[in-house]
Amino acid sequence: MNMNKKSFIILAIVLIVVVAMAVGYCYYQKVKKETTSADAIEQASNVTENLGQQASQGVLPSIDPQSNPMENAPDTNPMSKTNPFSGIKTNPF
């Protein structure tokens, strides 16, 4: 009887330790996942921004967002000049 009680206490302590370790591991993974995903997104955006700046340095001309390259483009639409009735005046009455 003495050995049975002693083994029961040891088994209970081992079980409590294993459960505590499992809960701690799950909590650690949850915290690690939350911080890792936020840090990874921020770090990836910084890396892509830096790579974009390094890749275009000295290669591309500066882009002015106010300029429109097609502002003075010629009218090349062939369909705008094919309507034979566009110059006819209509009777206002």
Image: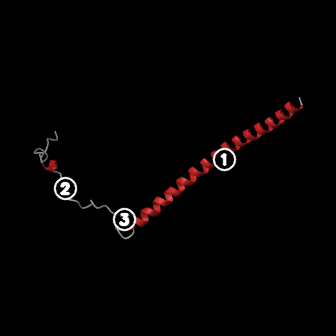
The quadrant the N terminus occupies is top right
How far is mark 3 from mark 1, CA to CA? Answer: 48 Å
Is residue 30 rendered to the left or right of residue 44? right
Q: Position of residue 41 (x, y in %)?
A: 53, 53
- Crowd around label 1: few <14 · some 14–19 · many ≥20 (10 Å): few
Inspect the image, locate mark 1, and give the three-letter code of the amino acid beneath it.
Tyr
Quick one: SS at disc 2?
A: loop
Question: For mark 3, what is the residue?
Answer: 64
- Tell me which corner region of the image, top left, top right, bottom left or bottom right, holds residue 90: top left
Residue shown at the point (48%, 60%) measured from the top left: 47
Of marks 1 and 2, the one in the foreground:
1
Is residue 77 rendered to the left or right of residue 43? left
Quick one: SS at disc 1?
A: helix
Q: Position of residue 87 (x, y in %)?
A: 12, 48
Question: For mark 2, what is the residue?
Answer: 75
How far is mark 2 from mark 3, CA to CA? Answer: 24 Å
**Numbered mark located on residue 28 in the image:** 1
> Disc 1 vs disc 2: Cβ atoms closer than 8 Å?
no
Which of the pair 35/61 is nearer the observer?
Answer: 35
Of marks 3 and 1, the one in the foreground:
1
